């Protein structure tokens, strides 16, 4: 398995996309530190990059990579190698390189300027989102044979979790505003990894005090250790479930 | 060696293999023939586990292959269209295959040197012509001295000299007592290489016997003639 991962990593590093991604993250983080001396504002600006760009790049790059390594997968499948091992090697190689790119890109400026309070939380949520969206990309890739369809599906996942879901949630909040919604909303947040990461991060910053009673409620929940564990476990589920599903499909796939 | 029992496979509504029963034994070489789309490649891919049979069993050396992968150590497979990572060099492909398999026995590099692939080690896969790709596939199939060789249209796209080299290699392997399965449309090639015929038509197994039997049944001395006579006979019965 390690040998396989080594070859896949070599292949990923050969096309310089991950390098550009790292550089982009580095430059934007660095620029935000330059623009603002208040570190929590820097984190807030970074939040948007972490919540929008990281999932988008992760899911699209992974889908394209999967189809580009179709030949490699085909060649390996004729060898005495377990299908699950081939699949897991792909997942590990892609998620390791994507998360390393993210850590180096956003982490280095933080090291230069001193790590802000919520810096670790930012790195953690970015890492988890990378893992989640890489996982979803694998699901999109094994469902269909057609590259264009898979990329379309990957984009749809992204649109859904980053944009459409929030609109739905706003609609629900608006329609049912006469009822106490804290707990249902908590459940709804858990059903979207991006929201989960956002809430986890926002509550690490002090601005949640501005959000009134609801903010206080969530701060109570997510601010506590229990809340952090809860959010992390749900995020891990968001990694494991798509991965498990795609592995199941891949094991029975005709190639 | 290979026992195929009631194997069925369908792609959507298309039934690619219909209840195939076959016993393939060591030391024989089988010609897998049939018109385009008759299920030859599907049958080969089922044996390799690239395509998962819907029903039925495939045993290799008495052990079921379903969900297993270790048995592929015994098989050398030359695909019809060899697809390899584009930006790898020929040398890297072989190095990777050897590295990943960790084959305990001897490595057979005869075809590598016969096809002069050694001189092209630095060429990237996407720059290769179809014929050179075929050579890479062939050399890979023979690389680990497998007991079973499955060649899917091995001579298509090869130049005459390379075809002869490959045929000689196959004949030597046959004499070694290995099991060989070749699918091809070129009857003259099969006449030299194969001892038995497997004829598939639209997923049905229509003939499975030795070439000599077929020739005496049809009173023809050449395989090509014998096959076409057999085909016209059976199809007139079927229609």
Image: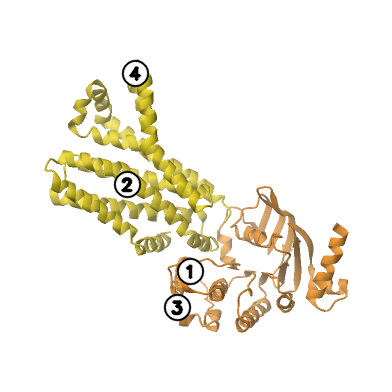
Chain colours: A yellow, B orange
Image x and y of residue B22, in percent: 74, 60
Residue drawn where x is 56% and y is 58% of the image: B69
Where is mark 2, residue-wise?
Answer: A54
User: Mark 3 or mark 2: which is in front?
Assistant: 2
The quarter of the image holding the N terminus of chain A is bottom left
Answer whether residue B62 is visible to the viewer in this image: no
Could you give the CA–CA distance between mark 4 and mark 2, rounded to whole angstroms? Answer: 32 Å
Tell me if mark 4 has few (under 14), some (14-19) or many (20+) residues whose alpha carbon lies within 10 angstroms of its own: few
Q: Earlier in the sequence, mark 1 or mark 3?
A: 1
Where is mark 3, residue-wise?
Answer: B121
Could you give the CA–CA distance between mark 1 and mark 3, rounded to whole angstroms? Answer: 14 Å
Where is mark 1, residue-wise?
Answer: B97
Residue drawn where x is 42% and y is 45% of the image: A155
Could you give the CA–CA distance between mark 4 and mark 1, rounded to whole angstroms? Answer: 63 Å
- Chain letter behind tag 1: B
Residue drawn where x is 74% and y is 57% of the image: B202
| SS at badge 2 | helix
Image x and y of residue A70, in percent: 49, 59
Q: Assess whether mark 2 and mark 3 are in contact (beta carbons under 8 angstroms).
A: no
Tell me if mark 1 has few (under 14), some (14-19) or many (20+) residues whose alpha carbon lies within 10 angstroms of its own: some
Where is mark 4, residue-wise?
Answer: A177
In terms of image quadrants, where is residue A90? bottom left
The quarter of the image holding the C terminus of chain A is bottom right
Is the residue at mark 3 from the same chain as the one at mark 2? no
Residue drawn where x is 53% and y is 74% of the image: B129
In the drawing, does residue A115 fall left or right of residue A128? left
In the drawing, does residue A169 fall left or right of residue A68? left
Is the residue at mark 4 from the same chain as the one at mark 1? no
Q: Assess whether mark 1 and mark 4 are in contact (beta carbons under 8 angstroms).
A: no
In terms of image quadrants, where is residue B64? bottom right
Is the residue at mark 2 from the same chain as the one at mark 1? no
Relative height, residue A74 to residue B31 (above, below): above
């Amino acid at each position: 398995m390690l040998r396989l991962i080594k070859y896949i990593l070599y292949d990923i590093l050969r096309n310089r996309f991950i390098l550009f991604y790292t550089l982009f993250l580095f430059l934007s983080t660095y620029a935000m530190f330059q623009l603002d001396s208040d570190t929590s504002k820097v984190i807030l600006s970074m939040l948007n990059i972490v919540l929008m760009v990281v999932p988008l790049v992760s899911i699209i790059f992974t889908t394209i990579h999967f189809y580009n390594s179709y030949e490699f997968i085909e060649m390996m499948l004729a060898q005495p190698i377990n299908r699950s091992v081939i699949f897991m090697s792909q997942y590990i190689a892609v998620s390791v390189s994507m998360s390393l790119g993210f850590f180096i890109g956003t982490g280095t400026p933080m090291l230069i300027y001193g790590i802000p309070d919520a810096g670790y939380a930012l790195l953690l949520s970015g890492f988890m989102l990378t893992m989640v969206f890489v996982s979803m990309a694998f699901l999109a890739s094994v469902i269909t044979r057609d590259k264009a369809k898979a990329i379309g599906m990957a984009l749809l996942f992204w649109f859904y979790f980053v944009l459409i879901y929030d609109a739905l949630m706003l609609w629900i909040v608006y329609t049912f505003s006469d009822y106490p919604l804290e707990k249902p909303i908590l459940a709804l947040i858990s059903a979207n990894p991006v929201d989960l990461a956002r809430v986890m991060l926002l509550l690490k910053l002090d601005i949640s005090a501005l959000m009134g009673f609801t903010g206080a409620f969530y701060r109570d929940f997510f601010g506590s250790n229990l809340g952090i564990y809860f959010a992390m476990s749900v995020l891990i589920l968001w990694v494991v479930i798509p991965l498990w599903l795609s592995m199941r499909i891949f094991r029975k796939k005709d190639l | 060696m290979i026992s195929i029992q009631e194997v069925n496979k369908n792609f959507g509504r298309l039934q690619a293999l219909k209840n195939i029963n076959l016993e393939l034994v060591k030391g024989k070489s089988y010609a897998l023939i049939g018109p385009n789309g008759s299920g030859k490649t599907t049958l080969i891919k089922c044996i390799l586990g690239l395509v998962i049979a819907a029903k039925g069993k495939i045993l290799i050396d008495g052990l079921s292959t379903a969900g297993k992968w270790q048995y592929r150590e015994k098989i050398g497979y030359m695909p019809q269209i060899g697809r390899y990572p584009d930006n790898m060099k020929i040398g890297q492909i072989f190095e990777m295959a050897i590295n990943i398999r960790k084959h305990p026995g001897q490595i057979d590099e005869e075809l590598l040197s016969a096809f002069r692939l050694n001189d092209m080690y630095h060429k990237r896969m996407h720059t290769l012509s179809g014929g050179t790709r075929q050579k890479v596939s062939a050399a890979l199939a023979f690389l680990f001295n497998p007991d079973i060789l499955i060649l899917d249209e091995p001579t298509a796209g090869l130049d005459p000299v390379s075809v002869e080299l490959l045929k000689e290699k196959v004949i030597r392997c046959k004499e070694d007592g290995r099991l060989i399965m070749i699918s091809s449309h070129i009857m003259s090639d099969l006449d030299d290489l194969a001892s038995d015929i497997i004829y598939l038509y639209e997923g049905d197994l229509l003939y499975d016997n030795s070439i000599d039997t077929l020739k005496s049944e049809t009173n023809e001395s050449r395989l090509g003639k014998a096959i076409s006579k057999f085909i016209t006979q059976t199809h007139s019965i079927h229609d």
